[in-house]
Amino acid sequence: MKKNLIYLLFSVTLLCAALTACSDNDDLDSTSVVRPTTTEQNDLDRWLKRNYVETYNIQLKYRFEDIESSMGYYLTPASYKQSVAMAKLVRHMCLEAYDEITGSTDFIKAYFPKILFLVGSYAYKTNGAMVLGTAEAGAKITLYNLDNLNPKTVNAKTAYFKTIHHEFGHILNQTKPYPTDFAEISGPDYVQDQCFEIYKTTESALQKGFISPYASKADSEDFVELIALYVNRSAEEWEEMLTTAGDTGRPKIEAKFEIVSNYMKSTWNIDLNELREIVLRRAEEAPNLDFDSLDDEDTDTPENSGTNE
Ligand SMILES: [Zn+2]
């Protein structure tokens, strides 16, 4: 009896191993984008080596051989064309914005995650919530939904770039913590995973003192949402949000934002007003970048060549 049980367990183990192996193979065969790691370097790889690896020490991964994503999601790879566009957009709208405000590439080189991973499809959680981006332990940012990127219509509020400012904010916080009094302002109001159930509209979140529904999740999310949403909005648009927040929401958002703004200035020497100006200008320039050529990395940002010093 005992022997049979052991045999049964052994069989189940073998079956599991076989199933795992099969599903891996199926995934590998299902699309031509998936290639062995010995793949020859293409134009994008060479461009990334010059403009991401050598400039920032960042690996931008877009092939599924590189997949390091959560196995909890069914994901498809980003196409070559979309990956080229995103590589140029992230550089122009995010990385170079920090270069410009800090005066060199050292800031991004030191603090930005070493891996930026691009995925074609959305990722959905079991509760139906859509995941736009994730950051893991300061080491990697994943951007989803490259399939729906239209580089000609991007603007400052396009979700991918807001996501990068959000995730990068987490990394800065993890490197140098923000003052503990931030968490006290909305203390009992944080609702963890119920944020989207409780706040179905931005308006309802604003009136409770949160800049977005997601900001009500926890103080760490609140903090980086304040950064990400501030730099992507003009002064008028920000004021409009505070007006919507009204008598109860506005003072809380303003009190929290003051801590955020002071932290960015005193800890990182970054003036959020100045960063916002840079981000908004670069977002306006973004649709006119050259998304076809990968030859010369300087041709797509001639107007900024004098401002990065
Ligand atoms: Zn977050």
Image (cartoon, helix red, strand yellow):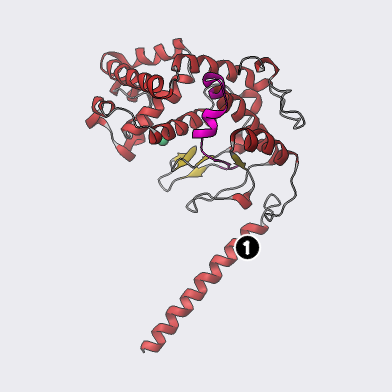
Q: Could you tell me which residue is drawn at 54 percent across and 26 percent down?
A: 158
**Residue 133 visible in the snapshot:** yes
Percent coordinates x, y for residue 178 in the rendering: 33, 29
Is 21 located above or below residue 63 in the figure?
A: below
Q: Few, some or many C-alpha atoms within 10 Å of disc 1 (few <14, some 14-19, many ≥20)?
A: few
**Residue 213 visible in the snapshot:** no
Is 88 located above or below residue 251 in the figure?
A: below
Which quarter of the figure is the C terminus placed in?
Answer: top right
Q: How many marks?
A: 1
Q: Which residue is mark 1?
A: 25
Percent coordinates x, y for residue 169 in the rendering: 43, 30
Q: Could you tell me which residue is drawn at 66 percent across and 56 percent down?
A: 30
Which quarter of the figure is the N terminus placed in?
Answer: bottom left
- Check the image and name the residue furthest to the top: 236
Q: Quadrant of residue 55?
A: top right
Circle 1 sits in a helix, a strand or a loop, which is it? helix
Viewer-nearest residue: 179 or 17: 179
Is 274 located above or below residue 192 in the figure?
A: above
Viewer-nearest residue: 257 or 79: 257
Viewer-nearest residue: 67 or 173: 173
Q: Could you tell me which residue is drawn at 41 percent across and 34 percent down?
A: 170
| Highlighted range, magenta | 98-121
Q: Is residue 280 left or right of residue 31?
A: left
Magenta highlight on residue 114: yes
Percent coordinates x, y for residue 94 in the rendering: 55, 26
* Quadrant in which ligand 1 is drawn: top left
Dot 1 amino acid type: Asn
Q: Is residue 224 left or right of residue 188?
A: right
Percent coordinates x, y for residue 50 in the rendering: 69, 35
Magenta highlight on residue 140: no
